[in-house]
Every structure is written in C-alpha cells, then in structure tokens.
Image (tube, rainbow, N blue to C red):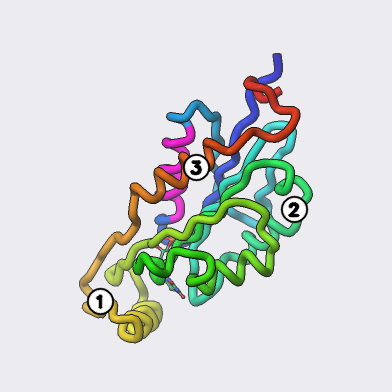
Amino acid sequence: MSPEKSILIVHGGRFGQSEKIARAIQTTLEQAGRATELVPLTSETAPDPDRHQGLVLVTSVRYGHFDRNAYRLVTHWRPWLVSVPCQLVTVSLTARKPEKRTVDNHVYTRKFVEKSDWPGLVEIVAGVLEYPNYNVLDRSAIQLIMRMTDGPTDKTVSIEYTDWDQVRRAAERFAALPPPAGADAAGA
Ligand SMILES: Cc1cc2nc3c(=O)[nH]c(=O)nc-3n(C[C@H](O)[C@H](O)[C@H](O)COP(=O)(O)O)c2cc1C
C-alpha cells in the first residue's frame, strides 16, 4: 500500500508569525486526520505531486508586497494547484481591522489573487505589531502606517492581532474540501 499523501504547508515571513499561523493550521489539519508536511518558503520550495495532495500557503505582507517566492511557487505549480485543494493565508497588520478581511477590501491580497490567478481558498489573517523587534527604519515606517490608520505608535508596544479562532476555522474549511480526483482514503 502506498503511504498517505500529505498536505504541504508552506510558510513565508520574516518575524515568525506566518510560521506560527502555519503551525496552528497544521495542528487543526492533523486533528482532522490529515497528514501534513510543513516547510519554509524559499526559491526552492516545490510540492512533490507523488507525496503531496494539497497546499496551504501562508505568507505575510512587507511594505505592501508578498514574498516573490510566493508568486514563483503559484505560477510555476499552477497546473498542479488547479488539481488539488489549496488555500492562501495572507498575514498583515491591515487585517487587524475585521472589515479588511475580505479579498475585495484587502488590496494586497486582491492584487496577489488577481496577479497569480490563485485557484483556491483565501483567508486574510491579522499578524503582529512588535515595535521592540524592528530596526529604526522599519519602526518609523510602521509608525507612519499606524498613524495613518489609527493604530498604536508607542514604540514599546507588542500586540498580537491574530484571531486564532479564525485560523482554526479556516483550517477546518480546508480539511473539509474533497480530496483530489483519484486519491482514496489512503491517498494512493
Ligand atoms: C518592515 C515591515 C513592513 C510591513 N509592511 C506591512 C504593510 O505594508 N502592510 C501591512 O498590512 N502589514 C505590514 N507589516 C506587518 C506584517 O505583515 C506583520 O507584522 C506580520 O505579522 C509579519 O509576519 P511574519 O513574521 O510572518 O513576517 C509589516 C511589518 C514589517 C516588520
């Protein structure tokens, strides 16, 4: 019997929040009985269609952009992605406002979805604000963004805005997607 194929969970990011979210998704998927493999997003990241039967891509916004490797992954693997369940999870501070957590209202995610022609589910999740971890330039830039959007500007502030219930529900939605055609319960 061939081993069960797994869901590939890929996380980008710089300060670890995308990874933390990816790990929470992994926990929920495994609780739902799905095998998973978690890897960082690099220029080399690639699914293996013989071993993987789905993709969750967790990636954060930095200065208005996602990691270019996220685009590379989606563009290069599109023929496979359209044949398996997949979910994009974007992480940003803009999403700390619940009304921004839709593709229409979240401009970065909307652009990614349009530009990459993303074929799967989309979840827009809030990240963290951690002034003490930023260098001077990043701190000033984030303070400016926060000032413009009525957020905290005190440089001692660390706030995790991530809604972990939302993350769990998103993973449950993914787990409920039908497996790709041809995959049986053992993922043959
Ligand atoms: C230098 C820097 C630039 C950022 N730029 C944006 C931005 O343009 N828009 C936004 O909504 N969030 C922005 N953020 C917030 C991050 O997306 C958020 O902190 C997220 O939790 C980072 O996740 P990561 O640790 O996985 O990279 C920025 C954060 C940093 C440190």
Answer whether residue 24 is magenta in the image: yes
Residue 42, how many percent across, how many down?
61, 55
Q: What residue is at 61 percent from the left and 32 percent from the top? A: 6
| Residue at the image position 74 percent from the left and 51 percent from the top | 77
Using the numbered discs, state the Cα–Cα distance from disc 1 to disc 2 in whole angstroms.
39 Å
User: Residue 44, labelled with which disc?
Assistant: none
**Relative to 78, is 20 on the left or the right?**
left
Q: Which comes before the other along the chain, label 1 or label 3?
A: 1
Please, what is the three-letter code of the amino acid marked with disc 1?
A: Pro
Residue 39 picture location, percent across and down: 56, 44
Whichever of callouts 1 and 2 sits on the residue coming sooner in the sequence is 2
What residue is shown with label 2? 78
Which residue does the numbered mark 1 point to in the structure image?
152
Q: Which residue is mark 3?
A: 173
Whether pointer 1 and pointer 2 mark residues with C-beta atoms closer than 8 Å, the reply is no
Q: What residue span does the magenta drawing correspond to?
A: 18-29
Q: Residue furthest top?
A: 1
Name the amino acid, label 3: Arg
Quarter of the rendered image showing ligand 1:
bottom left
Q: Which comes before the other along the chain, label 2 or label 3?
A: 2
Q: Residue 70, how many percent across, how many down?
A: 62, 60
Query: Residue at 39% across / 68% down in the picture?
Result: 99
Give the distance between the C-alpha atoms of the residues marked 2 and 3, in whole angstroms.
21 Å
Where is 181 relative to 141, above or below? above
Which residue occupies the foreground of this view, 165 or 91? Answer: 165
122, above or below 47, in the image = below
Q: Position of residue 82 (x, y in %)?
A: 73, 48
Which quarter of the image is occupied by the N terminus? top right
